[in-house]
Image (cartoon, rainbow, N blue to C red):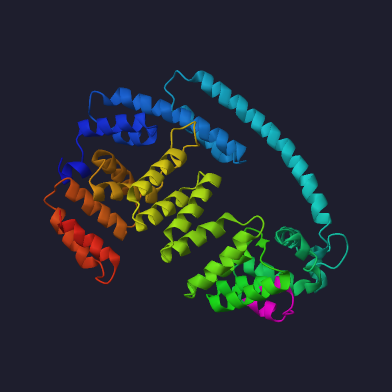
Amino acid sequence: MGLWSWFFPSAADRVETARKALESGRPDQARLELLELDHPDAPALLLEAENALALKNLEHAVQLARAGDDVRAAEHLQLAEDFHHGGHEEAFRETRRELREIRGERDAAEERRKAEEKARLLQVDPLGATGGPSFLDPQVDGDAFDPDREEREQRLALHVEGYPAALRSAAGPLGPEFGQAILDLQEGRTADAIQRLVALPDDAPLVQWERAKAAWGLQDPVGAIDALRRFANLAGGHHAMGNEHSGVFLASALASTGDPDGAVRVLREVLAAPKPPPSASFLLAQLLAGKKAYAEADGLLVNLVKEHPKQSEIYTLLARVRVAGGQRVQAMRALEASLEAVCCTPGKCGSQAPDLDTHRLLATLYLEDGIEQERALDLARTAASLAGQTTWEDAYLGALVARTLKSPEAPDLARRLIAATPTDTPLHERAARLLEA
């Protein structure tokens, strides 16, 4: 097969690709191959692919309904009906029954949640919900009639609820300026937020936390580092702050300023504390790989995979660490495990969308080592369909494909890639090896 036929396959090639896609549980890819295809086997395969897509969309409808997204659930149910050619009526009846039950359970849960949230908000004194001083006490009489006031107070209440329990009560005494600074940060007015925050007490840990976020937003990592260290000193260590963690934030800032050793020290402290966030292990693994401590990085990522088996980026980082450490076969196994766990057959794992990095890296490793070539080319096709703007890795994979297919264009593709790659980088050496075979 030449490079032309790889990029522009014949009708028979496309039918064979569609069969393989159906066998591996990817009816969407099979359908794309078969649409408007002039081949005697295409109509029957297309019907099979669309029926499989109908069942897949039924699964997605249930998943989305469980996630509370009734609009998209209805869209997927309609897609299932559009794709269905008959034979799966019982599956449709069962799905509609399940959707009704989910909506009923969710409605009841929503009523309970509203009652609990109302009770909780009434207990958050920093907002003055029980009659005490509020972050948003009116400065003029008209502010009491501001139609957005209630919405802003609820946003502030939820923000304060994200603070550690031991720090929440410290928010109220900071007054309206602190509340307005939070709103400024949420709405993208970072410069206004920092002006309000610098006027507030330096010995308030929550002020230091919000200052760190504002400094980071203004691309001032040194200022963020200073505020985060002050926060930790005042708050008795690092804490989970809503969806973030102050220790991971500090480590990221330190790494961005060229202090990976300092970042590693902070992350080790975070991981030694109770209930460390997964992001701490992920970032530490990245930093350790940069220091060539591959074995420790590998161990951290293996544990993360066990705890979060559906996160493809963990597998990809694990594979890159193993490649850097000379364990290419183990890297391939990690990527194959990712495809099995994250992008597997519908009905077994949620059938998430294919991940570009996983497909591209696995195809690259197989082609570099000259093994599993047919599978590698299939992976490369999927990667090419997922890629947006072409990156160096995309161009390198394309050159590998051309070399594997013994295309006449292969040497020219390799030379162009070599010329476009800086000579003082490891990438140049990889590109140069394209001409060795």
Name the one closer to the observer, 241 or 129: 241
Residue stretch rendered in magenta on the structure:
192-208
| Secondary structure mostly taken by the magenta-highlighted segment of the chain | helix
Say if 153 sits above or below 327 in the image.
below
Query: Of 137 and 196, which appears nearest the observer?
Result: 196
The answer to whether residue 268 is visible is yes
Where does residue 147 sit, x and y in percent of width and height? 74, 60
Q: Position of residue 226 (x, y in %)?
A: 61, 78
In the image, is residue 198 part of the stretch drawn in magenta? yes
Task: Name the residue: 24% across, 41% down.
Answer: 373
Residue 70 in which image quadrant: top right
Relative horizontal placement of residue 385, taking residue 309 as reference (left or right): left
Q: Given the current orientation, which residue lies at the most extreme bottom position? A: 199
- Asked if the stretch drawn in magenta spans residue 28, the answer is no
Image quarter of residue 317: bottom left
Give the residue displayed 44% in from the left and 56% down from the top. 295
Residue that appears at 65% across and 55% down: 275
User: Visible in this render: residue 187?
Assistant: no
Name the residue nearer the viewer: 389 or 234. Answer: 234
199 lies left or right of 302: right
Question: In screen coordinates, is 312 left or right of 406?
Answer: right
| Furthest residue toward right | 131
